[in-house]
Amino acid sequence: MKKTILSLAALVCAMTMSAQTADDTMNPLITAMPSLSIAPDARSAGQGDVGVATEADFNAQYWNPAKYAYMYSKGGITANYTPWLRKLVGDIDLAYLAGFYNFGDLGGGIGASFTYFSMGDVALTDPSGAVIQNVRPNEWSLDLSYFRKLHEYVSMSVAIRVLYSDLNNGVNAQSSSIDLHPAVTAAADIALYYRQPIELPMGTSHFGLGFTLKNLGGKMSYADDRSNFIPASMNLGISYELPCDKYNFLTFTLETNKMLVPTRYSSKTTKETAANPELWNDDGTPIDPSNVETWKMSEGAYSNISSARGWFQSFADAPGGAREEFNEVRWGAGIEYSYNKQFFARAGYSYENYYKGNRNYLTFGAGFHLSIVTLDVSYCVGLASTNPLDQTMRFTLGFDLAGIKDLVDNRKKK
């Protein structure tokens, strides 16, 4: 399917911080590489996009690599596929590959993943409407983590990541005043995981607590004089697995996500603008403390904020004060039922404030796990009439390398 240049313009606006806020209440946080915030696996997506504190699985590399220290297997790989925004277009896809290997309690282990996000075919046009060329914008990330147990119930991990985003495949209109080029940067994650068994009359329950700082890294630049924040975030989750009997289990999970990205539309800029044209609005007018319509920081000033400053500034720069800062927190809640740890049914809810993006949806999922292979699927139901995430499905296929090895060894013995 071929989309018009308006589709690319929308993507550029979303990824280069140039989108205009509708008014003083609509104030979403816009970043480069938004694909980094898409839940890639069906298990977590089926529970309302939660995974920081849930029981370890093959896709822990994305959510919390420290969970790998508690995997039942020494190694595994997984492939995930998401046809994205299918209500709008038919050729945007997210693919995610992950794997890990655990050296043991003393040596820890390593995990790795590769994410590829294709934005489909886009027709680039010049101001007259003539097609310049068809391009396929894409972005990808590659990361590596190290994890180990610090205690019987506590593990930690660190990860490094390379990020790449290409919006126009190097094609620029001669009449354009801005030449776009691919953007590259690096980032790091820090993660903690706590999982404690609790003995109950009906069996052993587990309490889980997870904390991550994700995508702490440099900014991305699609143009020489502009830089853009990546979706750094602070994530906190809590889970509780309750055994109903020997075979039936229920797991409840609640998680929060706070973007560590400063808002461009902020009254905080009014304190230092009168004599500094760099902080004026893009149309060349000064920011007026008495006029809310002028409280938007200029694109140049926003670009000059460093990554580290942006992380800390994100906690206290919203024009609505503490209330708006609280509105920037996304929430996810999920429940998972499992029978004999082989058959799974899931449901969840993800909430984002209306003025921060309004990504509110219900999710459902199912899974089938054997000693060697796992298969999961999830489905999203948007709660807003115009929610483009409605009907989004995800698919996950995983393989237990240790189980495959045991199967091969057993066949050799026969």
Image (tube, grey):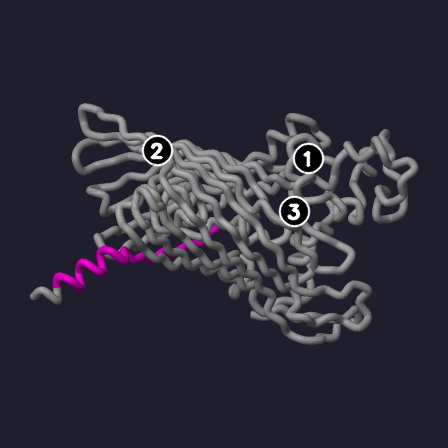
Seen from the viewer's position, the closer of residues 413 and 252 is 413
Residue 16 shown left or right of residue 384 in the figure: right
Is residue 124 positioned above or below 238 on the image?
below
The residue wearing badge 2 is: 151
Give the left or right position of residue 339, taking residue 22 as reference: left
* First reached walking from the N terminus: tag 2 or tag 1: 2
Q: Tell me, yes or no, whether the highlighted magenta stretch contains residue 321.
A: no
- Residue 361 location in percent, x, y? 48, 42
User: Label 1 belongs to which residue?
Assistant: 313
Of all residues shown, which one is farthest toward the top?
201
Quadrant where the N terminus lies? bottom right
In the image, residue 79 lies at what x, y percent? Answer: 38, 59
Residue type pointed to by label 2: His
Q: Please, what secondary structure does the residue beneath circle 2 have?
A: loop
Mark before the other along the chain sequence, 1 or 3: 3
Q: Is residue 87 left or right of residue 97?
A: right
Gap between marks 2 and 1 measured at Cα? 34 Å
Q: Look at the image and say whether residue 393 sits in the magenta stretch.
A: yes
Q: Give the magenta part as a residue range.
A: 390-410
Which quarter of the figure has residue 372? bottom left
Q: From this viewpoint, is residue 82 visible?
A: no
User: Which residue corresponds to the image point at 56% horizontal and 66% vertical from the top-left?
Assistant: 120
Q: Which residue is mark 3?
A: 30
Residue 136 occupies which quadrant of the picture?
Answer: bottom right
Q: Is residue 94 left or right of residue 166?
A: left
**Above or below — where is 85 with respect to 152?**
below
Q: Which mark is residue 276?
A: none
Q: Is residue 271 above or below residue 167?
A: above
x then y, percent, for residue 139? 57, 61
Helix, strand or loop status at disc 3 = loop
Measure the alpha-carbon separation of dots 3 and 2: 39 Å
